[in-house]
Amino acid sequence: MNILEVDSLQTYYGKSHILHGISFHVGEGEIVTLLGRNGAGKTTTLRSLMGLTRAREGSVRLFGADTTAWPPYRIAAAGVGYVPEGRRIFANLTVEENLKVPLERPGPWTPDRVYELFPRLRERRFNKGRQLSGGEQEMLAIARSLMLNPRFLLLDEPSQGLAPMIVQEVFNVIVGMRAQGISVLLVEQNVRAAVAIADRACVLDDGRMVFEGAAAEFAADEARVRALAGASAERWEAA
Amino acid sequence: MTQLFLFNVFNGLIIGAFYALMALGLSLILNLSGVINFAHGGFLAVGGYLAYTLMPFIGFWGALAVAPLLTALIGLLVEFVLIRRLYGRDPLYSLLLTFGLAFILEDGTRYIWGAATVPFDIPDWMTTALSDQFFFLTGYRLFMVLLVFAAVAALFLLLNKTRLGLRIRAGSGDLETVSALGVNVRVLRNLNFGLGIYMAGLAGVLAAGMLGLQPTIGSALIMPSFIAIIVGGLGSLPGTLLGGLLIGVASGVVTVFFPSASEAVIYVMMGVVLLVRPRGLLGEEGRVQ
Ligand SMILES: Nc1ncnc2c1ncn2[C@@H]1O[C@H](COP(=O)(O)OP(=O)(O)OP(=O)(O)O)[C@@H](O)[C@H]1O
Ligand SMILES: [Mg+2]
């Protein structure tokens, strides 16, 4: 069964038409990476899935239910964890307090278990969110989404602004999620790191889906990377 | 002279405690929902009158416990029926709505309970001074200050130690992310509004015991409470508490030396704070607007 099925999604911000009928799916236990240049509509896609910017047309099905018109809290309560662009840690709350904000669905993830995954966070649990480094904030954002015990995780550019070693650590955690049966939709600018761990890749350009296929197939086609992934192609070469 | 000075400082502390109680409720609602609740003083009056009506049946202590809760219940209802429709719109809408609501509450209490000041009976032992030297220190006034501090302490415990409180604090910075983490923010805002109104109701009962009751009892407190928020720093609840106490005590002290300036001093303090430290005493950086 597919965890997520998106059909002909159209999303607007007021009058600006951003998503022009995109369709894709995420299967159970898959990591799918959603790529595309700046402004292609990746964040908007995640926001539509989460119910934060409701799609005007088309449909979103999560775990078999039509969630297109659901409010965000209901979508989260169904088991979707969300790690937003820029992390959006609660800056005036401590690490420990940040972990108490999400709805707690029953499951294996507890603060202790999350601290085992990210020992750094345990050390800093009494520090405020604003005192954390970028890498620590990213860990906290992932940890926070795990408190919900998600079946499906949406990650928006987790590698943004992180040192290569930290990126590797974060991506290892994402692979670990898949091993525990959590499906993942990973939005990334860091194409190389993303396709290395993903099962499949989708590429957005100007609000349209221009590629959907095996991650390995995409990774092999360097011309395509250059043509479609835009700015991220430079990183591809630099990396 | 010392006596007069202490008398006015203590008076200022009492007034400041009221400002703080009002301002904390206003702050909670403003921070989470972006609504400036001009009707807060109206809810204060409702709290006082409800206590007045209930007292013959359940006594002073019963009324003190029940009336703020009933006021909060009315607050929950008002939020549910009216206020929530205006979230996310231009703040002008909610401003006009709560402004109108303030008139409705004031005239409503006048219609039901009359315009004249009604006496509010507190237990006898509370009305006598604790000592001859400190004639102004009645049991009731001392009790009032202690209760306000207990209520404020309870509020801060709730905000720091309970899940509801943490979500209110988190949502005051980023409500959207709170909703994406599975929290029903409609319910959160509703409860938060009720919490703010509870404190207005409590302030109403306490104020009634000191001043007696009239429909306009809340209007005198509302402007200084807004100023307490600005002086303390927008977005900071500890700041709001500090701001309330500070302007209360300042106006008390000024009364000793220059009685006619006791109200002006509040505005002067606001002006000085805004000039020297635009974000307020404990305000966060980047929340100046
Ligand atoms: N709140 C908004 N109001 C209006 N337009 C917006 C808004 N947010 C984004 N846009 C526009 O929508 C388009 C898609 O933005 P989106 O954030 O989804 O892109 P993205 O693929 O996530 O880009 P990036 O890689 O830079 O994060 C862009 O042209 C952007 O300018
Ligand atoms: Mg984006």
Image (spheres, coloured by chain):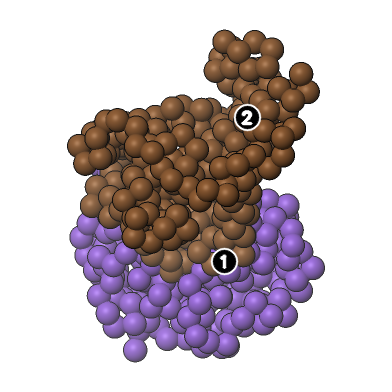
Chain colours: A purple, B brown
For label 2, the residue is B12
Residue B128 appears in the figure: yes
Q: Position of residue A140 (x, y in %)?
A: 64, 65
The residue shown at (41%, 71%) is A76
**Label 2 within 8 A of ligand 1 by Cβ:** no
Please name which of the two marks, 1 or 2, marks the residue nearer to the observer.
Answer: 2
Subunit ID for the residue under disc 1 = B
Q: How many marks?
A: 2
Q: CA distance from mark 1 to mark 2?
A: 32 Å
Q: Quadrant of residue B76?
A: bottom left
Q: Position of residue B18 (x, y in %)?
A: 54, 38
Three-letter code, disc 1: Thr
The residue shown at (43%, 45%) is B121
Q: Quadrant of residue B132?
A: top right
For label 1, the residue is B162
Subunit ID for the residue under disc 2 = B
Position of B51 relative to B164 (above/below) = above
Q: Position of residue B163 (x, y in %)?
A: 54, 67
**Label 1 within 8 A of ligand 1 by Cβ:** no
- Disc 1 secondary structure class: loop
Question: On the picture, is B206 further left or further right than B37?
Answer: right
Q: Nearer the viewer, residue A168 or A127?
A: A127
Question: On the picture, is B55 further left or further right than A179?
Answer: left
Q: Where, quadrant-wise, is the N terminus of chain A in this rendering? A: bottom left
